Amino acid sequence: MLEKAMHLCDGAQGTLWVFNGEHMRAAATAGYSRELAEQLSEWREIHPFQGRLLQGERVFQIIDLAAEELYRSGSPLTRAAVDVAGIRTVVFVALVKDTTTLGGFTIGRRAVRAFTKEQISLLRNFAAQAVIAMENARLITETREALEQQTAWCCRRCYGASTTAATVAAFQRMRALPIGQAAPAAPWLKRWCGLLLASALTASSRARWYRCAFTRT
């Protein structure tokens, strides 16, 4: 997404910044050297330009970074953008969910040339898509963590200290099925789980497994 936005807006470098309190880091980059991209991926204090996004601005551009006071005063990030990367014009677009600023897009050019209204509108659309992708990723992570905790709890309930890695893996595979497929697949799963766990579990343990894994509440 970042590379496509950079290409369509005739940019040379692009960065997707994420914020965490008073710090920021690059979650994605395009057009950077590997070394610089790794440096930007580390948490750092929010730069004054990104701070404007955090304070409520939704989009703005700097026509010439080299003419800015931050460059003349020696701001490391601004100096690196101009002196190392050769960036002159930059547009900043906020990533906003509801009223919370999650981060921002920056697209830079190696020429003093303003971004057009059409290009800025396009970047705002990309920003909206990025917010949706970030939210989906957060929900997936939270769901995975919740399922892992549920799996561990269920296995402890069924087997206590005798829980094996095979038990956990089998339960996770069963849980990964869509709900609509779980019920019809249950007979197959029971046979499969029985074969998988036969060497590790006693008959009474397998009975507890089936009751725990396939009884819905």
Image (cartoon, rainbow, N blue to C red):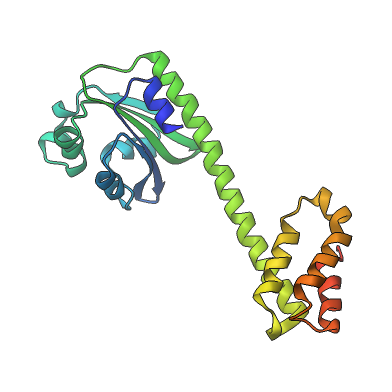
Determine the residue positioned at 48% across, 28% down: 126
Relative to 207, is 112 on the left or the right? left
Where residue 111 sits, quadrant-wise, is top left
When the figure is inspected, residue 154 is found, relative to residue 120, above or below; the finding is: below
Is residue 65 or residue 160 the one in the foreground?
Answer: 160
Compared to residue 90, the image places residue 167 above or below, namely: below
Image quarter hosting the C terminus: bottom right
* In-front residue for pair 25/200: 200
Which residue is rendered at x = 39% and y = 14% of the image? 117
Instruction: Identify whether 103 is placed above or below 22.
Output: above
Please say if 163 is above or below 69.
below
**In this rendering, would 108 be left or right of 20?**
left
Residue 100 visible in this rendered orientation of the protein: yes
On the image, the x and y values in percent for residue 186 come to: 86, 60
- At which x and y percent is residue 193? 79, 68
Give residue 209's position: percent from left, percent from top: 81, 74
Say whether residue 55 is visible: no
Judge left or right: residue 144 versus residue 157: left
Q: Residue at x 86, y 77 (%)?
A: 207
In the rendered structure, the answer to whether residue 143 lies left or right of residue 105 reads right
Count of marks overlaid on the render: 0
Q: Position of residue 208 (x, y in %)?
A: 84, 77
Is residue 91 or residue 107 the one in the foreground?
A: 107
Residue drawn at the location 35% of the way across and 47% of the way down: 25
